[in-house]
Every structure is written in structure tokens, then in C-alpha cells.
Amino acid sequence: MTPADPFRPITPDDDPAVAAIIRSVMTEYGAVGEGYSIEDPEVDAMHAAYQGPGAAFWVVEIDGQVLGCGGVAPLKGGDADTCELQKMYFLPRLRGHGLGSALMRRCLTWATQAGYRRCYLETLESMDGARRLYRHYGFRDIDAPMGATGHCGCDRWMVLELPEGSGA
């Protein structure tokens, strides 16, 4: 089903497809309205949002179609050692083929090499599959949100201590 490496950095041409994926998956899980990432201003301009220092974003392209995405960026309102796993979403037909795990490895390796010491994420209780993936990679539940993401609709927060990397 998948090519050897279906991942590539986001380009400006990917913005409409990525926005559609985010909106579709968030709607699938009832995460619509204020307090969810579906309302983030960068949803329609993801390429530009991840061009700053300490940020990277990838798309998953199969047969010329962007079907998934995810990235890492500094945690808003967090310390310099903490990044956030952001907007990792896959359309249903892409799930269950090991690509979430592969993208997670890519994100965590990049974050470690960039010199981050921990990776934070926000999710929903209803996103069981995603939470299983996060736990598989060592993320642990925490009792309250970190930083100032504005995602007050999220009801689960997790963090992973990263191995010491090579630095940015």
C-alpha cells in the first residue's frame, strides 16, 4: 500500500490538503469549535507556520495524495527545552498500516536532534488509537496542560522525556 518513504516536508501546495485532513479528523472526533486545534489560525497555512526555528512538519503522500500529517514545534508558553507534537492526523484509510508509528519516530528523532529535552502533546480521551501509539513511545499522562496552546477543549495531556540529542 505504501511506498518505502511516503514522508516529505510540507510545501505551500500542501496547505489545502492538510487543512482538509485536520478539519476532517477533528470533526470525526467531535473536536470542533473554540478550544480545539481545528480553530488555530495556522490551519490554512501550515507550511508557513512550521518554517521558524525549532519546527518541522511532514506530510504523508501516497499515490500523489496527501493523506496524513504531523510535526513538532516549540511549545507555546513553554520553556526552551520543550517541544510539542502537533497536528498529527491521518485520514481513516491511512490508519492501521504502521505509518503513525513511522511518523512518530521521525518526529521524536528530529526533536531529539534539535536539542529538545521533552515532548508534550494534547489529545482527547476519545482518540484511543492515538493514545495507544503515544504510550507505546513512552509518553506518560500528566494531570494538567503545559504551556499556553489555547486548546482548552483537549482533555488529555502527555509528556515524554527525550534522550539527550546533538543539539540544534
Image: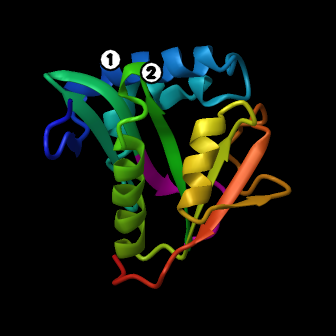
Magenta extent: 71-80
Q: Is residue 139 above or below residue 122?
A: below
Q: Residue at x 42, y 77 (%)?
A: 115
Q: Is residue 139 above or below residue 3?
A: below
Where residue 106 appears, as percent x and y from the top left, is: 33, 57
- For residue 20, say whether it is visible: yes
Where residue 127 appears, as percent x and y from the top left, is: 65, 33
Viewer-closest of 75 and 96: 96
Mark in front: 2 vs 1: 2
Question: Dividing the picture into quarters, in which one does residue 119 lie?
Answer: bottom right
Viewer-closest of 88 and 40: 88
Q: Is the C terminus in the top left, top right, bottom left or bottom right quadrant?
A: bottom left
* N-terminal label among 2 and 1: 1
Q: Is residue 76 magenta?
A: yes
Q: Is residue 162 above or below residue 15?
A: below
Q: Is residue 83 above or below residue 37?
A: below
Crowd band around label 1 with a 10 angstrom C-alpha radius: few (<14), some (14–19), many (20+): some
Viewer-closest of 103 and 59: 103
Q: Amino acid at mark 2?
A: Pro
What is the distance, in whole Å, between disc 2 and disc 1 at their CAs? 18 Å
Question: Which numbered dot is residue 80?
Answer: none
Question: Which numbered dot is residue 16?
Answer: 1
